[in-house]
Image (cartoon, grey):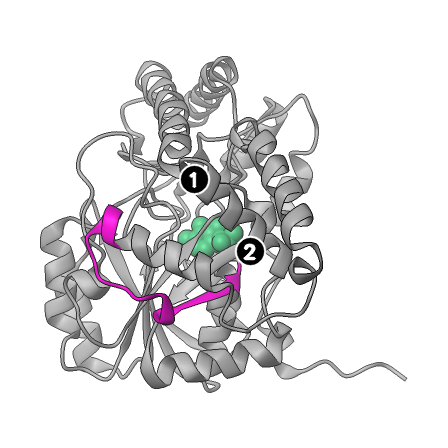
């Protein structure tokens, strides 16, 4: 007898990027495909010392079950950091520690989405959110991204003509496009959302990875005082393997999130929370982030320079001031899927853009990651890719 899968499984597919990463396992391929932080920057020695201290000083407690909300001193640290770095008021009670910020997306789906509900996302949008919300059989609406944030005219029309439960956005150095919302767009989004029955979910794993220019306040709490949830993560500023993220929310929303998390995994790893807390207490996270910024900043510069030297003019590429990604747009007639097949033959990889568009557009776009390759490989890989593009254009 065949087993019977739930309906929801028919609409969700394996992550396309994970499939691509399999192809790029070949060591001779220079890969700009993954979205991995650079492992050379993981603070291994300091985390090791923190782990030993936790074991010695709180051995049994660090291995016991703990509260769903998360380790209070860690929540307090995160709240204080919001004040210091972003200038917004958040209390420790409003923070819910999660197993990576990816878990927040699952909890949001559980708490807010019925089958068929509209979810508004960016075009292109974060693949992990598309996958997670799809599990709840949501219907996606998309708003296009311009250089400085969403197209506000399109957003207003979407909001006026449809009822959506959630608007999910990555406002700093977005994955996949690398784009950041300007203060004007932040204000504009807040003005359009204010007074409507829609939840704004602002996901910000990359905000602190700014190499140049000035940073802006989050839309949630900074510009929009109600109906907002802010997501954060230690993945890009410390180490993703700890699976530590968080959600800022209050009141009834928070109560429901706690119920959903209890049902999901009871709580996030007690040990991981204590080790990261010890790490940020005994070390300066600011100094560590400074190192990441310096390294990614120069890797980004090398990639931008190589693109200027090797890509034909017809290819448009974003120039983000932080984060981990650049976004390229080929001439309309070109398919980045076809280019991908060709690029693999030339031993270089990227992620074709189409999976980031739920409406099936974006055929001529692709994402380049600059955080996880050394500078010589970036030079060489971009040259190979540029040669491949020129070949394609001359056909
Ligand atoms: N949101 C965005 C926009 C991301 O790019 C990522 C990581 N790829 C995540 C959430 C998930 O991060 P984590 O679960 O490691 O915190």
Q: Residue at x 39, y 63 (%)?
A: 359
Residue, far front = 57
Badge 1 is on which residue?
367
Tell me whether circle 2 and circle 1 mark residues in contact (CB < 8 Å): no
**Residue 104 visible in rendering:** yes
- Residue 221, given in percent of the width and then of the height, sits at 20, 65
- Ligand 1 within 8 Å, label 1 CB: no
Bin the neighbour count of mark 2 within 10 Å (Cα to Cα): few under 14, some 14-19, many 20 and up: many
Q: Residue at x 52, y 83 (%)?
A: 259
Secondary structure of residue under mark 1: strand
Secondary structure of residue under mark 2: helix
Badge 2 is on which residue?
273
Can you tell which of label 2 and label 1 is closer to the viewer? 2
**Foreground of the two, 131 or 39:** 39
- Ligand 1 within 8 Å, label 2 CB: no
Bin the neighbour count of mark 1 within 10 Å (Cα to Cα): few under 14, some 14-19, many 20 and up: many
Q: Which residues are magenta?
A: 83-99
Q: Is residue 62 left or right of residue 230?
A: right
Indicate yes or no whether the magenta region holds residue 350.
no
Q: Compare marks 2 and 1 and give the one earlier in the sequence.
A: 2
**Foreground of the two, 226 or 160:** 226
Q: Is residue 86 left or right of residue 347?
A: left
Q: Is residue 53 left or right of residue 256?
A: right
Q: Residue at x 18, y 33 (%)?
A: 213
Q: Would you place residue 91 above or below residue 227 in this image?
A: above
Q: Would you place residue 172 above or below residue 140 in this image?
A: above
């Amino acid at each position: 007898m065949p087993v019977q899968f739930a309906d929801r499984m028919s609409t969700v597919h394996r992550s396309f990027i994970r499939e691509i990463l399999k192809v790029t396992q070949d060591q001779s391929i220079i890969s700009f495909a993954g979205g991995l932080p650079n492992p050379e920057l993981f603070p291994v020695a300091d985390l090791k010392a923190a782990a030993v201290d936790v074991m010695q000083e709180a051995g049994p407690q660090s291995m016991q079950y703990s509260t769903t909300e998360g380790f209070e001193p860690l929540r307090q640290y995160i709240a204080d950091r919001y004040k210091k770095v972003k200038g917004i008021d958040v209390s420790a009670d409003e923070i819910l520690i999660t197993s990576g910020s990816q878990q927040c997306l699952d909890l949001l789906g559980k708490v807010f989405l019925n089958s068929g509900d509209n979810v508004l996302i960016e075009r292109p949008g974060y693949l992990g959110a598309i996958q997670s919300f799809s599990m709840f059989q949501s219907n996606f609406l998309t708003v296009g991204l311009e250089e400085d944030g969403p197209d506000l005219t399109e957003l207003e029309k979407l909001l006026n003509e449809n009822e959506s439960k959630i608007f999910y956005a990555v406002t700093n150095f977005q994955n996949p496009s690398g784009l950041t919302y300007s203060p004007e767009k932040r204000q504009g989004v807040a003005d359009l959302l204010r007074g409507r029955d829609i939840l704004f979910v602002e996901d910000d794993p990359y905000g602190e990875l700014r190499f140049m220019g000035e940073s802006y306040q989050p839309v949630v709490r900074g510009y929009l005082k109600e109906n907002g949830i802010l997501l954060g993560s230690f993945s890009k500023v410390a180490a993703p393997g700890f699976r530590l993220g968080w959600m800022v929310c209050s009141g009834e929303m928070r109560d429901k999130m706690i119920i959903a998390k209890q049902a999901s995994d009871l709580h996030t790893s007690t040990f991981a929370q204590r080790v990261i807390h010890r790490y940020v207490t005994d070390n300066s996270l600011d100094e560590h982030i400074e190192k990441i910024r310096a390294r990614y900043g120069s890797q980004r510069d090398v990639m931008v320079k190589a693109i200027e030297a090797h890509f034909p003019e017809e290819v448009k590429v974003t120039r983000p001031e932080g984060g981990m990604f650049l976004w390229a747009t080929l001439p309309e007639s070109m398919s980045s899927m076809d280019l991908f097949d060709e690029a693999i033959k030339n031993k270089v990889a990227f992620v074709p853009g189409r999976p980031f568009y739920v409406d099936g557009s974006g055929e001529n776009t692709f994402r380049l990651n600059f955080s996880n390759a050394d500078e010589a490989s970036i030079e060489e890989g971009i040259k190979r890719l540029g040669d491949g593009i020129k070949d394609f254009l001359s056909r």
